[in-house]
Image: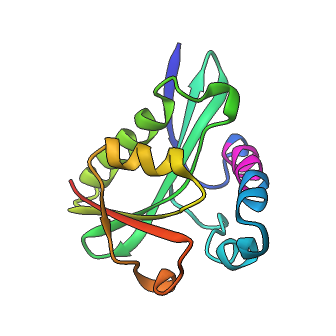
Amino acid sequence: MIEVVKTNSSNKDFIDLVGKLDEDLAIRDGDEHSFYAQFNSISVIKYVIVLYLDAIAVACGAIKEYDEETMEVKRMYVPEEYRNKGFATKVLKSLENWSNELNCKYLVLETGVKQPEAIRLYEKNGFSIIPNYGQYIGIENSVCFKKEI
């Protein structure tokens, strides 16, 4: 059975999944990892989704306020053994719905060029590549996306 849980960044399963995400990103990003890590603190994220399959946490994602009408998608992750089963899309749709409930009109996000599966996920779900924003301006390893919801 699949269960979608709305929570926050104090959720233990979310913390565990983000730990695995950070391990993966450290390998993919190499020397650039510390630059990205400074923007990925989970200490005070109010809007977190954890997806459970038969009571096992198999995916996560979060949103945080970017501006008055925009939420930024953060900390999307599915462990390798649970990939290609639609879990990331389910988390992303849940975050989109939650953003709608919060009266937001847009979602933005940043991912890395070394994460082709993430790029495919966002494109498949209607996100469009935009010029890099905020702290990602001028960062060649970053790809930024936006979606009207």
Q: Which colour scheme is used?
A: rainbow
Q: Residue at x 61, y 38 (%)?
A: 78
* For residue 15, side relative to residue 145 (left or right): right
Q: Residue 114: x, y in percent? A: 60, 58
* For residue 94, side relative to residue 32 (left or right): left
- What is the span of residues highlighted in magenta in the rendered image? 14-22
Camera-side residue of 123 and 65: 123
Q: Above or below — where is 33 with respect to 136?
A: above
* For residue 48, side relative to residue 147 (left or right): right
Q: Residue 146: x, y in percent? A: 30, 63
The answer to which image quadrant residue 102 occupies is bottom left
The answer to which image quadrant residue 52 occupies is top right
Q: Residue 58: x, y in percent? A: 63, 30
Q: Which residue is drawn at 41% across and 68% down?
A: 144
Q: Can residue 10 be seen in this view?
A: yes
Q: Residue at x 60, y 67 (%)?
A: 44
Task: State how many labels appear.
Answer: 0
Please tell me whether residue 30 belongs to the stretch shown in magenta: no
Camera-side residue of 48 and 27: 27
Q: Is residue 48 visible?
A: no
Q: Residue at x 63, y 68 (%)?
A: 40
Q: Residue 83: x, y in percent? A: 59, 29
Q: Above or below — where is 7 with respect to 106?
A: above
Camera-side residue of 42 and 25: 25
Magenta span main SS: helix
